Image: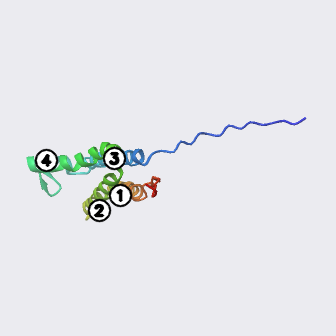
Amino acid sequence: MNSIKKTAEMEDVKINVKLKISALWIAVLFLYVYVDIFSLFKPGIIEGIMVGKIFIFQVSQTFLFFTTLYILIPSIMVFLSLVLKPKVNRWTNIIISIFYIVSILGSCIGETWAFYIFGSIVESLLLLLIIWYAWKWPKQESIVDNNI
């Protein structure tokens, strides 16, 4: 007597590149927030904030505006990565990711705290993944009829 065994395979759904990139922007934003919150626990930081200084920067409307703008861009990229046309989406993600990697590396100059360096490395790796997915954006085949 022959017996047939059924095995169930786990489903593996192909995830669209737009969803992957959007999810990576979300992960980058979470890291930004947590690394910045953890930075508040470094000795002297709260005291500096209380007198209007963050690292070498004077807390002012201009400083807070540009800080907001810095976080606003990746926040908007979560949405734009889902809705922009592929060609614009690809280059927007590549260019903005490169800018943020450079800014993250710049913020590490002189940094000695391991959590900050580690967080910055992971942020940069996630941004490199965004660049990778954007660069390797899947091509869609089209049919061209030359007999028209």
Mark 2 vs mark 3, CA separation in Å: 24 Å
Within 10 Å of the Cα at label 4, are there few (<14), some (14-19), or many (20+) other Cα atoms?
Answer: few
Give the residue at mark 1: 124
Position in image of residue 105 (x %, y %): 29, 62
Disc 2 is placed on an element classified as helix
Name the N-terminal-most of marks 4 and 2.
Answer: 4
Name the N-terminal-most of marks 3 and 1.
Answer: 3
Which marked residue is nearer to the observer: mark 3 or mark 1? 3
Give the residue at mark 2: 105
Which marked residue is nearer to the observer: mark 4 or mark 3? 3
Disc 1 is placed on an element classified as helix
Which marked residue is nearer to the observer: mark 4 or mark 2? 4
Q: Quadrant of the C terminus?
A: bottom left
Q: Are marks 2 and 3 in contact (CB under 8 Å)?
A: no
Q: Foreground residue, 27 or 99? A: 99
Name the N-terminal-most of marks 1 and 4.
Answer: 4
Give the residue at mark 4: 65
Q: Foreground residue, 121 or 145? A: 145
Tag 2: amino acid: Leu
Disc 3 is placed on an element classified as helix
Q: Quadrant of the N terminus?
A: top right
